[in-house]
Amino acid sequence: MELIAIGDICSYPGKLKLILSGFHEGALAARGCFKYAKPDEKLRFEFTTTSKAAQERLGIKK
Ligand SMILES: Cc1cc2nc3c(=O)[nH]c(=O)nc-3n(C[C@H](O)[C@H](O)[C@H](O)COP(=O)(O)OP(=O)(O)OC[C@H]3O[C@@H](n4cnc5c(N)ncnc54)[C@H](O)[C@@H]3O)c2cc1C
């Protein structure tokens, strides 16, 4: 089992302890978790700015 950490608590070569880094690591962690949660599904990378499906899931009305 892998342990996942994000934010200031984790470190690696080149790590910058910034708010931005934590957000980025959050996105990477979510991507990593997908493999464990849905091993048989392929991740479809989508932007919320352009994906109608993502906007519907989030309840964003245009
Ligand atoms: C003085 C200062 C100025 C900074 N200025 C900037 C800046 O201008 N721009 C920038 O990008 N970054 C800045 N940073 C860095 C930025 O604050 C951190 O990188 C960022 O807050 C890390 O977020 P985090 O969620 O990983 O950790 P944290 O923000 O430290 O959050 C961790 C949380 O976990 C809680 N916690 C700890 N132990 C436990 C426990 N056992 N159970 C439950 N909760 C627990 C803590 O109380 C805390 O609320 C600054 C840092 C400092 C110290």
Image: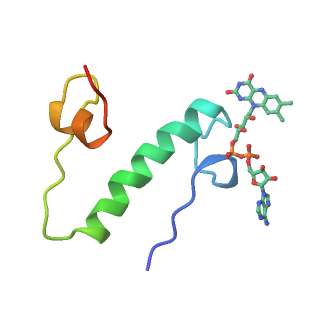
Q: Nearer the viewer, residue 20 or 11?
A: 20
- Residue drawn at point x = 31 percent, y = 70 percent: 36
Q: Residue furthest top?
A: 62
Numbered label tally: 0
- State the quadrant of the N terminus: bottom left
Quarter of the image for residue 52 reads top left
- Residue drawn at point x = 42 percent, y = 44 percent: 27
Side of 11 where 37 appears, left or right: left
Q: Nearer the viewer, residue 35 or 60?
A: 60
Q: Nearer the viewer, residue 13 or 48?
A: 48
Q: Position of residue 18 (x, y in %)?
A: 66, 32
- Residue drawn at point x = 45 percent, y = 73 percent: 2
Q: Position of residue 19 (x, y in %)?
A: 64, 33
Q: Position of residue 15 (x, y in %)?
A: 60, 40
Name the quadrant where ligand 1 sits.
top right
- State the quadrant of the C terminus: top left
Side of 37 where 27 appears, left or right: right
Give the answer, above or below, for where 48 lies relative to 26.
above
Side of 18 where 28 appears, left or right: left
Quarter of the image for residue 35 reads bottom left
Q: Residue furthest bottom?
A: 1
Q: How was this image coloured?
A: rainbow
